[in-house]
């Protein structure tokens, strides 16, 4: 088991015991880690992690009446980690890469963490790291503004399994609608944040852009995650977070400069590239984000052509036809 995986589990357990009062069991924690990170974690692994945390001084106790763990002292902090200059530099590069998420509280919290980590190192090391990071820039996507109070309510609902009431302003509407939702999963994508949740109104999993939530209030009701809920069924890390679209096999032909550039990057984790005798290439992958694929293909102009599925090809034909009409001389 990697050090990173152990650290991630320990941090997650620490956060759960610090910020919630629901006394999670080892089975609960193992299930949550599998859902959040896709790790093959067992309750026995969690129990070993908790024993190691106790060895480091963590005030973890088990409540037999509630069948779960809790902190006797929530002010306790995990001991600081030993970091090398290279470790800190890697974290600072990550900090630069997070510029696109300045619209979330995680950004300020991470900046605070980086500053504390810097203080743990000798002065000559921290200065050298700053000199190195000054030579690195990361261009981030534009971000939207998200109300701080909305963030606080959404995070509390996620951490404590509390239902929230949101005032949502849908595109094309003049007023907001009120929806009662159970927050299930938070997704950051290209500078934007989206909330996957169970909508009491629709009786199904829906997705809401946080910047369109104008007001959010945590309610008294608690909820349990649907047993079969899996965030991966509603998102594709390679392309986006639209839901209610069927997963299909995508086939795109690229030629010219695009045919030379496409193989240089991993656009999708399941992509397959086929070289053609005429110098063009065929890119194949499967996704449930057809709309996002259409947006992406449009960036390549005439160098890309959607071949399959037929319905997406027809959408592209109509879209580009309407676009061309706007530029017609008449």
Image (cartoon, helix red, strand yellow):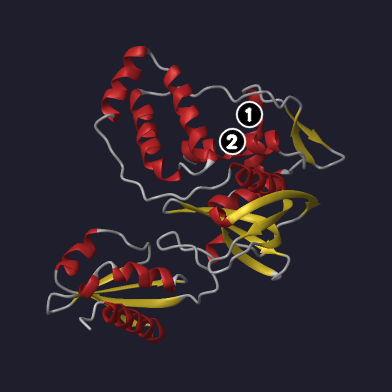
Q: Quadrant of the C terminus?
A: bottom left
Q: Name the residue beneath numbered marker 1.
A: 53
Between the C-alphas of marks 2 and 1, the distance is 8 Å
Can residue 42 be seen at all in this image of the molecule? no
Q: How crowded is the residue under tag 1: few (<14 C-alpha within 10 Å), some, or many (20+)?
A: some
SS label for mark 1: helix
Using the image, determine if residue 322 lies above or below residue 193.
below
Name which residue lies at 81% across and 42% down.
67
Image quarter of residue 304: bottom left
- Res 202 quadrant in image: bottom right
Q: Nearer the viewer, residue 176 or 116?
A: 176
Q: Which mark is residue 10?
A: 2
Marks 2,1: beta carbons within 8 A: yes
Q: Earlier in the sequence, mark 2 or mark 1?
A: 2
Which residue is situated farthest in the right direction here? Answer: 65
* Towards the viewer: 255 or 43: 255
**Residue shown at 20%/81% (left/top)?**
329
Name the side, left or right, on which 124 lies relative to 172: left
Tag shown at residue 127: none
Q: Position of residue 314 (x, y in %)?
A: 36, 86
The single residue placed furthest to the front in the displayed view is: 330
């Amino acid at each position: 088991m990697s050090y990173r995986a152990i650290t991630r589990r320990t941090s997650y357990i620490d956060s759960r015991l610090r910020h919630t009062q629901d006394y999670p069991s080892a089975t609960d924690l193992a299930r949550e880690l599998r859902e959040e990170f896709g790790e093959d974690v067992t309750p026995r692994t969690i129990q070993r992690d908790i024993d190691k945390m106790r060895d480091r001084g963590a005030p973890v106790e088990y409540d037999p009446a509630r069948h779960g763990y809790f902190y006797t002292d929530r002010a306790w902090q995990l001991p600081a980690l030993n970091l090398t200059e290279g470790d800190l530099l890697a974290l600072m590069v990550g900090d630069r890469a997070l510029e696109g998420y300045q619209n979330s509280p995680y950004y300020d919290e991470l900046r605070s963490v980086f500053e504390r980590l810097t203080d743990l190192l000798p002065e000559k090391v921290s200065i050298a790291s700053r000199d190195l990071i000054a030579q690195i820039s990361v261009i981030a996507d534009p971000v939207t503004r998200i109300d701080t109070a909305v963030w606080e309510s959404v995070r509390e609902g996620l951490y404590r399994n509390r239902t929230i009431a949101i005032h949502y302003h849908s595109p094309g509407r003049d007023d907001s609608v009120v929806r009662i939702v159970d927050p299930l999963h938070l997704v950051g994508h290209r500078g934007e944040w989206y909330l996957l949740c169970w909508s009491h109104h629709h009786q199904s999993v829906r997705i809401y852009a946080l910047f369109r939530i104008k007001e959010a209030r945590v309610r008294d009701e608690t909820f349990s995650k649907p047993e079969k809920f899996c965030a991966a069924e509603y998102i594709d890390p390679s392309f986006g977070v639209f839901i209610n679209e069927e997963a299909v096999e995508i086939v795109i032909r690229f030629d010219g400069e695009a045919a030379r550039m496409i193989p240089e990057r991993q656009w999708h984790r399941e992509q397959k590239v086929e070289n053609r005798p005429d110098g063009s290439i065929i890119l194949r992958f499967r996704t449930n984000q057809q709309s996002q694929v259409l947006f992406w293909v449009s960036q390549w102009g005439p160098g890309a052509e959607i071949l399959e599925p037929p319905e997406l090809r027809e959408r592209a034909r109509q879209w580009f036809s309407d676009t061309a009409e706007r530029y017609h001389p008449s």
